[in-house]
Amino acid sequence: MSDETVIASALKNFSRNSKSDDKDNNQDGSETEDGEFGMSTQFDNINTDDIESIASDTPEKIEISSTEYLKNIPLWSSTIEIVGRIEEIVASKEITFQKTGGKGTVFKFVIANDDGTRIKILSWDDEINRVIPFISIGSIIHIDGAFSKPIDSKSRCYNSGSVDIELKVESNTKINVLKRMSPREVPTLETFQYPLITIEDCEQYIQKKIRFQGWTKTNFDVVKLRTDDSFKCCGSIAVGDGYKIEIKLINFQQPFESPFSKGDHVEVTGIMKNYYGRAMIMIDSIDAVEIIDGCKMSLSLLIKSNKEIKFQNQEEFPFKKQRQV
C-alpha cells in the first residue's frame, strides 16, 4: 500500500483509547532522553514487531488534512479533527511552570501533510500513557476531539509547527492509526534526509526542517534575560559570502558547555524561522549540530561574516510581538 494522500482506513479501533490500556502502556517514551527532536532519535518509538497497514479491508477513503484546513482551524475548540503523518516525536519530559512553580510532564509530536504543513500536538500528564502506543514515525493517524489553542508570543519561535496554533490531547480525544509503516517502508538515517539548503533557499523553507552548513562564529552559550530572569541558549554560524545565521536551542541543561570551538565546520539540522525579517534556525538541542570535518574558518573571515540573511516577504511570515516590551 503506497503512502499517498488518499489512504484506506477504518475507524473501528477507537475503543483502544480506553483508560484500561493505560497501565499496559507505561513503558514507551518516558525513559528516553528529554528534548530529542532530531534525526538521531526520531525512530526510537517505531514498533517493528507489529507494523501493518491498518484496516485495508474497507473501501472508505480518508484524505490527509489540507494546508488550507490546518491554517484555518478555529481557536479554543475541543472538537478539532485532523488526519496527518507523524513526522517528529519528542520524548516525555518534566516542565516547571514559571508563574505557579508547579510541575507537569509533557509529550509532544508533530504531524504533517504532503505539502509539509506541520502542526504540533501536546499530551500532558495522565493522557501520555494512552497516547504513546499510537505514535510512531511515518504512521498516518486520525485525531478526533483535540483542543486548539494559540501559540503564545514567548514560545512562538520555539514551536516546531508551521501554523499559528497547536493542539492538545484531552480526555475526550481519540486517536486512530490509519496506516503504520511496513518494515520495508521505515526510512533509514541515510534515506530520511532533510534538504541541505543554501543562503538563496532560506525564504522558501521558512517553517520547514532543513540542514545548513557553516562554521561556528559565536559559540553556543547560555544567556540570562533581564526581563524575566529566564535563560536562552544561542550561537551563530558563518555561512559564506560574509553572511551569518543565528541558531537558537529549545532544550539545554545548565551548566552548559559547548562541544564546539570557534571556526569548526558544522552542519545544523533545525527549523528555518523568520525572526523579525531575518533568517534564524531553531534546533531542539545541541545534538542537532554535528562536525563535518576538520576544516576551520580563519578568525579574520569569521569576524567579517556579519551580514544577516534578510527576507523580502516580511509580511507573510512575521513573528508578531515575539516579546512583550
Image (tube, rainbow, N blue to C red):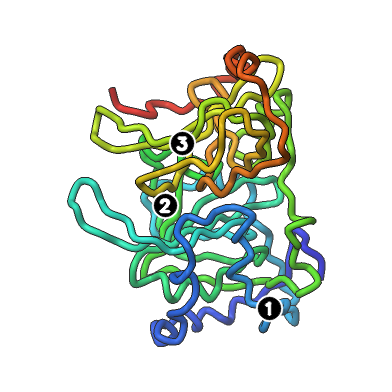
Question: Which of pointers 3 and 2 lies earlier in the amino acid sequence?
Answer: 2
Instruction: Write down the residue under mark 1.
Output: 48
Position of 219 compared to 103: left or right? right
Q: Position of residue 128 (x, y in %)?
A: 41, 70
Instruction: Write down the residue under mark 2.
Output: 148
Position of 180 compared to 225: left or right? right
Asked if the residues shown at circle 3 and circle 2 are in contact, with their CB atoms under 8 angstroms apart, the answer is no
Q: Quadrant of residue 301?
A: top right
Q: Residues within 10 Å of mark 3 (few under 14, many from 20)?
A: many
Secondary structure, mark 2, is strand
Identify the residue shown where x is 36% and y is 39%: 152
In the rendered image of this protein, does residue 64 appear above or below residue 131?
Answer: above
Secondary structure, mark 1, is helix
Determine the CA span between mark 3 and mark 2.
18 Å
Identify the residue shown where x is 45% and y is 44%: 250
Q: Position of residue 312 (x, y in %)?
A: 62, 16
Q: Position of residue 281 (x, y in %)?
A: 56, 34
Q: How many marks?
A: 3
Instruction: Write down the residue under mark 3.
Output: 157
Mark closer to the observer (1, 2)? 1
Q: Given the image, on which type of amino acid does mark 3 rest?
A: Cys
Determine the CA span between mark 1 and mark 3.
34 Å
Q: Position of residue 180 (x, y in %)?
A: 68, 72
